[in-house]
Image (spheres, coloured by chain):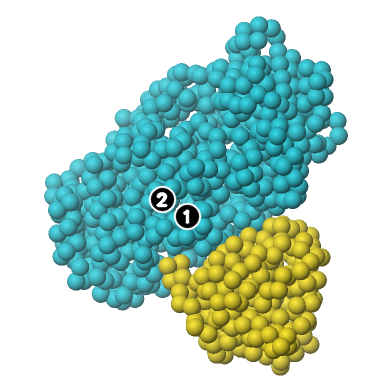
Amino acid sequence: MSVPMSVPMSVTVGVVQFPGTNCDLDTFDALSELGARTALLRSDETSLGGVDAVVIPGGFAHGDYLRTGAIARFSPIMDAVASFAGAGGPVVGICNGFQVLTEAGLLPGALRPNAGLSFLCQPQQLIMVSVNHVLGHGLSPSDELSIPINHFEGNYVCDGATLRRLRENGQVVMRYVGNPNGSVDDIAGICNETGNVVGLMPHPERATSELLGTADGCKLLNALLSAAASTRRAAGHRAA
Amino acid sequence: MLGLTDAEYGRICELLEREPNHLELAMYAVMWSEHCSYKSSRRHLARLPTEAPCVLVGPGENAGVVDVGDGIAVAVRIESHNHPSAIEPYQGAATGVGGILRDIFTMGARPIALADPLRVGPLDEPRSNWIAEGIVSGISGYGNSVGVPTVAGEFVSCETYRDNPLVNVAALGIMPTERLVLGRATEVGSAAVLMGASTGRDGIGGVSVLASAGFDEADDDSTKRPSVQVGDPFEEKRLIEACLELLEAGLVSGIQDLGGAGLTCAASETASRGGTGMEVDVSAVPLRQHGMEPFEIMTSESQERMLAIVSSAHVEQVLEICSRWEVSATVVGRVTGDGMLRVREGVDGAVLAEVPASTLHDDAPSYDRPMRPPADLALRRSVDPAADPAAAGPSDCAGDLLAMLADPSWVYRQYDHQLFLNTVVGPGRDATLLRLRDPRNGAPTGRGLAVSVDGNHRWCDADPRWGTAMVVIEAALNLACVGADPLALVNCLNFGNPTHPEVMWQLSEAIDGMAEACDALGVPVVGGNVSLYNETNGTNISPTPVVCLLGVHPDLVRRPVADELPPGTELMLLGPSGPAVGDDAGTDASSLGPTSLGGSRWAWERRGCRDGALPGLDLAGSVATARFVAAAVRDGLVQCAHDVSDGGIAAAIAEMCCHGGAGVHARVPSLGSPAPVERALFAEPPGRVLVAVEAGDVERLAQAASSAGLASRPLGSFGGSRVQIGRIAEPSLDIDLALDDTRARWSGALPEAFSQPVEGAAA
């Protein structure tokens, strides 16, 4: 892995830990290896502690009991995440994190059980659609990525009007090549209207080394670090 | 329901010098069950080699522990959850995962990987299909949620497992060597803290009702369902984190999971290992249901519970850490100095039971059960499966091959097999290879940890001794295919009813075969599990010893398995010199002998013949082959390696084509002349490995093999869009299939088997 020179070493990314989250340390390690300072944020905390970006990682927050993300959205940390997102801070939800963001109303739509009604952990080809968001820096539309998926509830659904808006506003972040789970319009990831909140089902932290099969996830994580650096600079300007 | 014999009852009376009361009797019943006491197998297991420099903890503790260098220790354990899974497949399999993980973190290790060798009945039968789907869902549902990747496994379907599936589960954990913790209570006055879930009526008598008796028609299986536990992976996840924090902080002196035989087992084992006694106050145990009797509390197998031994000065801190992880923790007893396990109602309340703790296991009976080879053994071994004229039709080698191909990804894609970012070679290949990282700081060590789980009931049915040795050798060859050398082994011995002399003979023979193969490899057995009474209506399953072999890759700098095979890549066969690699072809014209089809998958599945002698096993030559292949893979001398096992050389070649996305044109050794074509294609003589080699390296590889005393033989090359397999010196092809069709059958076999409408499935 190479660390792009454009990423200042001082960028800090917060990784949220709910009880039952299990990709927290993988995400922490992957971001750290790319040169970020990384902080674990417990879900019962009420402050993000001044981080420049937030990642809600994959796993089974609160055991996925009731419904994925349904309990996690009420955690104290989620108020802080919502305020941070409202102020334009970069927020990325991966897999279970995506589910939490839709439950919390920070992203539209919902994630239902896979069309085949079975869990899928497999390599996945993806196509970038829009790059006007916090995972887009350095990527181009129609770039192909290979990043694994690992979910039971990845079947993205939303109403027709929402889907139209997502397309028209460039909020479809990436699509599956060969739809594995029944998602509407092959959607694998979306962003909010301002592009600072992104949810995606594939796990970029699992695609950070050729030894493990693919390093394409580094492109997305590096884009996030760039976005975090911009946020930090903007905040610095405001403070000045 | 107790399952004690009159003689065992008499022995209890002798030990206590009085009659036991009901609670005491219940405690002896679970602890002296076959499952907990190994009473039929103990004297045989003693013949396995258990010592080696790498062994930190051998058999008898919650898990075996080996030193893998760099100050890192690996804990490894395998168990069975066969009978619970036959009754309630989802929960049976799920709680098997939960139980094995507790065995691992009990030792102080963080669980990093699970492996699930599964054996089920014919998938075209509704009930077997339902059981198989339930088992896979249970492992997926529990393992994924608890946050431990399932990185390896097996999926075998055969009618011998129709009513008695085998659900084995292995787990690996990793820790700094200095953190090793043993489950014992040594300090008198320490508190016994019960952590985790509340105690309910689920799983009462699981070890005696389910695990230590067979199934028969008079039983309605549903009556045994209350003996199956119910799992909660979210509770287990929090329990793992809380326990590891307690161990890291050095706040517990011993810790033990509550598995089979529940609180009785955990309290008596920690006390008797520590040479102490223990008092348990049943009124302090948090209960899930009202009105539970003391015997229910003491024998409940409710899941996700641990017993921690905590010196009184640390109790408050322990309770505080548990509370932070939202894990319930309650002081339920104390360590005493008198060697007694005493159950009370209230802290100093009435004594409900009082027995010497050590008698619950040290004095458990050990039986030298009668054993006898089957009367028709010689007759069975004289059969040649390929020469049965009544069954023989015209050869359809291509059809036979296609029927034996099945990509297991339908199973393993339902398991998270990538968590923790260690999986270099995942499930579906010969062995799994994980990055070995330092548990202190996550830094890569530049080395790899490899694991392979293997069993073969057909080989062991034909010959339990050499069949078991072949299973161990296959596991070593599997590790070699990802560049790893074997380090330590754990076994799960799945057999039938031990009161049948033939079953005891199979068990004894299998243990001897395992010992011989382990000795040849220089690998110790560091733990195991024995599952007996795998029988239905008096019919025993085929003997099925399953091994989990752990290995180390010393220099992991690149992926050892090529994902694609470019056209022109050469295919070579390596192995001990002899007829199996085609040396001295023509001298082995007999129908039996070193290249027999006996015990082969082809004979069982395509010819319906379970008889015949096993092919010959050259132990030393096979071990040398494993060493050679492992080194060749590490050196990059071969692009990809695949051992020849069930389905024979034809299946192995076709699998390489399916994985590598390439056709092949290959000519394989005839294995005798004249000999039936099926022998060349589908016989399973052990010790053989196929390798894909760049054309420029063929000569170098052949010379290196020859210097290592091994045989090598070029078979052909990859490329094109057809899978073409013939025999050396025969002009015509025996198999000529389109690669696309072959791949479609391979990848479609399991999805199709599980998409059939399943009507009338029992529920």
- Nearer to the camera, A186 or A22: A22
- Pinpoint residue B363: horizontal percent, then vertical percent: 56, 17
**What shade has chain B been given?**
cyan
The chain carrying label 2 is B
- Pinpoint residue B722: horizontal percent, then vertical percent: 33, 73
Amino acid type of the residue tagged 2 in the rendering: Asp
- Nearer to the camera, B49 or A176: B49
Q: Is residue B611 visible?
A: no
Amino acid type of the residue tagged 1 in the rendering: Asp
Q: Is residue A65 visible?
A: yes
Kindly identify the residue that appears in the image at 71 percent across and 57 percent down.
Answer: A19
User: In the image, is residue B86 above or below residue B261?
Assistant: below
**What shade has chain A been given?**
yellow
Kindly identify the residue that appears in the image at 62 percent across and 83 percent down.
Answer: A229
Sequence-earlier tag: 2 or 1? 2
Q: Is residue B577 left or right of residue B660?
A: left
Q: What residue did someone put label 2 on? A: B70
Quadrant occupied by the N terminus of chain B: top right
Q: Is residue B613 left or right of residue B365?
A: left
**Residue B438: mark in rendering:** 1
**2 and 1 marks in contact (CB < 8 Å):** yes
- Pinpoint residue B486: horizontal percent, then vertical percent: 35, 47
User: Which residue ends up furthest to the bottom in the rendered image?
Assistant: A168
